[in-house]
Image (cartoon, rainbow, N blue to C red):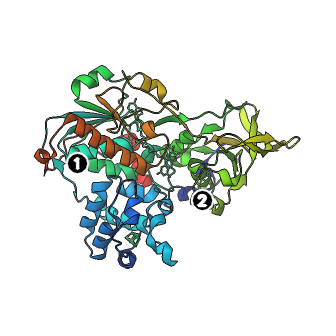
Amino acid sequence: MLGLETASNRDASQCKDNFTEIRPLMASMEAVVEASRCLFCFDKPCMLACPARIDVPGFIQKIRTANLQGSARIILEANILGESCARVCPAKALCEGACVMHKTGEQPIQIARLQRYAVKDVLDRQIRVLRAGRPNGKRVACIGSGPASLACAAELAKWGYAVTIFDRNELPGGNPSHSIPSYKVRTSDPLREVELVHQLGVEFRQNTEVGRDISFAELEELFDAIFIGIGLGDTSPLDLPGEDLRGVYGAKQFVRQTKMGRDKVKVGHRVAVIGAGNTAMGVLVGLKHLGVEAAYMIYRRSKEEMPAFEHEYELAKEHGVMFHWETQPVRILGKKGVVAGLECLRTRQGEPDARGRRELLPIPDSEFTLEVDMVIGAVGQKPATEFLRAVPGIQLRKDGTVLTNELHQTGNEKYFAGGDCAHGGKLVVDAVASGKAGARGLDAWLGMPRGTNAPETFGGAGAWAPVPAPSQTLELTAAS
Ligand SMILES: Cc1cc2nc3c(=O)[nH]c(=O)nc-3n(C[C@H](O)[C@H](O)[C@H](O)COP(=O)(O)OP(=O)(O)OC[C@H]3O[C@@H](n4cnc5c(N)ncnc54)[C@H](O)[C@@H]3O)c2cc1C
Ligand code: SF4
C-alpha cells in the first residue's frame, strides 16, 4: 500500500540509522597512528585547500604528541565550527583531496576524522581553549545564528567586541542545526559549538526575527555595526502542475522535519527527489535511512553534468538510490489530494549555447510515469530578497545575493554581509570563512587597534544557554 506513513512504523533499526553518524569517531591509538603518517609538509597544501585555513599539519602534530587541547585550539581558532565541519565538509574535495599522499599512490591522511577526534575531546570535557578579548567598547549585531554569523561573532568577541546574535529560530546554529541531514550532523552537535561562542560572551537572542520583532532602525541605534548572515530562503519551487498536492516538499523543509520531528516525520514508500546537487544526494541517502522502499533521483541533464560531488553520488549509489538521468519531470499526479505519481519524459542534448551548455530536447513519445507517493524538490534555494531589500541602502546582485566590497561591507556602510546570503549556496566552511572575513572588514572599518584588545577574560554573560527548553529536551538528548 502506498501513502505517507510515520517513519517509526517502518523498520525501527533503519529509522535509528538516520540519526547514526556515517563517519565513525577515531579511537586514540588509531588517531596517533594516523597522525604519525603525516609528512608535515612545509608548503601545507592541505591548509591552502581549506577555506577556513586551518593549520592542518600543526594540529596533526599536536595529536601525535598527545596534546589534544593544543590541537583543538589550533582548529577552533581558525574555525569555530571545527567539529561540525569535520562531519559535513566534503574533505575529499578539499583538504584530503590536496594531501600529497595522493602523489605517492598512498591513502590521503584522514584529516576530517583527526580534526573531529581533537575537537570532540575538548567539547566533551568542556575545556575552554578560546578567550574573549578585553572589551573595546564597540557593539556589533549579527543577524542569523548560522555558520557565517557564529564565525563572525567568535572573531569579534576574541578581539573585545560586545556581540549580540539575533535569530528567528528557537535553536541557534542555522542549517547545521536544522537542515543538513542527521546522518551527517545531528541537531545537538552544532549546539556544542554555539556554546563555545556563548562562552566568549556573545549574547544570543533566539525567536527574534529582525524586521519583525526588532527593526533595522533599532539595531542601528543600539549597535556600531551590523553583520547580515541570514543564509538563503526556502527551496525554489518546482513550477510543476500538482505541486500543491500533499506529499510534495522542498528539500530544506523536509530535512528540517526529519531533524526536528525525528521518527514522527511522515515519509512515502516510493519517493522521487528532483535535482542532482549535493542537497539532492543528501536527501536521497537520508530517505534510505528512513526506510523508504524506493528512492529515485530525477535530473534533466546527464550524469556528467550533475552538480553533486562524486563522493556524494557514490554514497547515494551505495544506498541503492535509483538514478534517472536525462529525465524531465512534467507533472505530479494526485489521487484524493495526495501524490500518486510523477509523469516524466526523456531528454537528449541539442547544440551547445553561447556558454557551451547544451540545449535540452524532449524525446518524442518517451513519456512514462513513476509510481511514487512523495516528491521532494532539491533544485536550489532562493535568496531572501524580501528581507534584504528592506535593509536601507543595500544593493543586490541580479541573482538576489548581497553585493559587498572587499571589506564585506554592503551599500550601507554600517551593514556587512557574509555566508550564503552574500556568495550564494555554498558549504558550511565557506560560510565560516566568509564570516571571519566579514569580522576583519568590520574591525578595519571601525578602526579598532587590535593591540589594545588582546584576550584577557573568559566571557559567559550571554542570554542563550544550551539548556533546552522542555519542548526541546527530547530532541537534544535523544539525538546525541
Ligand atoms: C538541505 C541542505 C543540505 C546541506 N548539506 C551540506 C553539507 O553536507 N555540507 C556543507 O558543508 N554544507 C551543506 N549545506 C550548505 C550549508 O548548510 C550552508 O552553506 C551554510 O549553512 C550557510 O551558512 P549561513 O550562516 O550563511 O546561513 P544559514 O546556515 O542558512 O543560517 C542563517 C540563519 O539566519 C536566520 N535568519 C534568517 N532570516 C532572519 C531574520 N530576518 N532574523 C533573524 N534571523 C534570521 C535563520 O533562522 C538561520 O538560522 C546544506 C544546505 C542545505 C539546505
Ligand atoms: S598534505 Fe597530507 S601529508 Fe602533507 S601536511 Fe597535509 S595532511 Fe600531512
Q: Where is residue 171 drawn, in percent x and y?
A: 38, 41
Q: Where is residue 368 drawn, in percent x and y?
A: 83, 44
Disc 2 crowd rating (10 Å Cα; few below 14, some 14-19, many 20+) is few
Question: SS of the residue at dot 2?
Answer: helix
Of label 2 and label 1, which has the lower sequence position? 1
Quarter occupied by residue 170: top left
426 with respect to 34 (left or right) = right
**Which quarter of the image is occupied by the C terminus?**
bottom left
Q: Which residue is the site of mark 2?
A: 310
Q: Where is residue 231 drawn, in percent x and y?
A: 44, 38
Question: Amino acid type of disc 2?
Answer: Glu
Q: Nearer the viewer, residue 125 or 164?
A: 164
Residue 154 versus residue 115 in the image, above or below: above
Q: CA distance from mark 2 to mark 1?
A: 38 Å
Q: Which residue is the site of mark 1?
A: 199
Question: Amino acid type of disc 1?
Answer: Gln
Question: SS of the residue at dot 1?
Answer: helix
